[in-house]
Amino acid sequence: MTLEEMHAVDPKDMYRLIKEFPAQAREAIRIGKAASVTLSVRGVSEIVLCGLGGSAIGGDLLKSYLGAELKVPFLVNRHYVLPGFVGRNTLVIISSYSGNTEETNTAHREALKRKAKVLCISSNGMTEKLAKKQRTPLITIPGGLPPRAALAYSFFPLLISLSRLGFIKDKSREIKEALALLDEKSALYSNPDPETNRALQLASNLCGRMSVIYSSTERFDAVNTRWRGQLAENAKTLSFGHVLPEMNHNELVGWKVLKEQMQGMQVIFLRDRGDHPRVQVRMDITKEIIGRYTPHIVDVWSEGTSLLARMFSLVTLGDWVSYYLAVLHREDPSPVAVIDHLKSELAKV
């Protein structure tokens, strides 16, 4: 695979957007540090982030990353309707990259009615208009990207804001390591050399196969979600996934009847040395069981020291896998025409 072949399939240059993720992360960190987040969080008993798609995955990653540190519950809400407990003691984060996400804007208005504390992050649109009208804090991020390619903008400013608001400790050391790792991986994965590029190797394994992504439920459930979303939007291919230990109590039984279909499935275990010891044992046993039905099973281990670096080592790998799989499928990774069609049809109703 050559750069010329890749660019022929990728006229809008998703390659560049993924390659420049480390630079985007640095810009996002600058935005987070410079943002005016004057908000009293005294008495806040829970955090609810409202978003969909690429605007929600940043919240998923925050929830997973901070799960052991946050002293208040953190929920990601992908719906028009807010949970019944949302009220004056709730911090509601409105995350809409475009600012025009229908479900999120509906939840935004409901949060205002319930007198919740609101923090917005957006590039434009109705989210920005409502924030300015209500004089609620707004983190403005650059627009013009596919939301899935703006992950750093939806993650790092909020991470820094939660630290500045006193919910978590300063993460400068962890961020520094993560950035260095992202620089290293960007240089490695952007070179389409099949001998050294792990992302291209995995994409080649996935080509023409249904992929199944398994991970632990503790910190890598959101990374699992990101992989499946990127495979769908960039590579235009279906995958499914689950988390351990839960899948050991239901889905594992489903590996029995559809023998012909299972034979061609590619199973990827996203693994981390910090996974619960019993979950690691479960993964090993689960691999042996699934190996009776498909020979295509691979462990993909996180890299880095801090949890933040380890999570983003797998995030960036998954992004590149989805890109190379799109090229192998001869599919332009940028358009999401069916989503645009759905939105246009919804607008008629």
Image: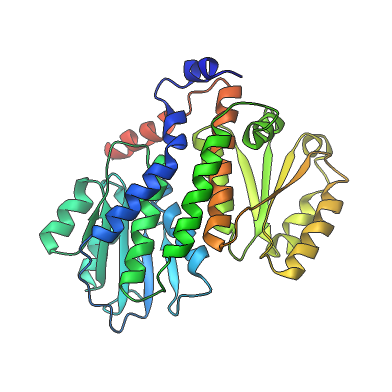
Residue 166: give x, y in percent of width and height: 34, 76
Residue 254: give x, y in percent of width and height: 77, 51
In the rendered image of this protein, does residue 200 appear above or below residue 174?
above
Residue at the right extreme, as displayed = 292
- Front residue of 136/153: it is 153
Residue 80 in view, yes or no: no
- Front residue of 323/232: it is 323
The part of the image, by quadrant, that contains residue 238 is top right
Q: How is the image coloured?
A: rainbow
Q: Residue shown at 30%/73% (left/top)?
A: 165
- Front residue of 131/202: it is 202
Residue at the bottom extreme, as displayed = 43
- Front residue of 111/300: it is 300
Q: Residue shown at 82%/34% (left/top)?
A: 260
Q: Residue shown at 71%/32% (left/top)?
A: 205
Q: Is residue 133 left or right of residue 111?
A: left
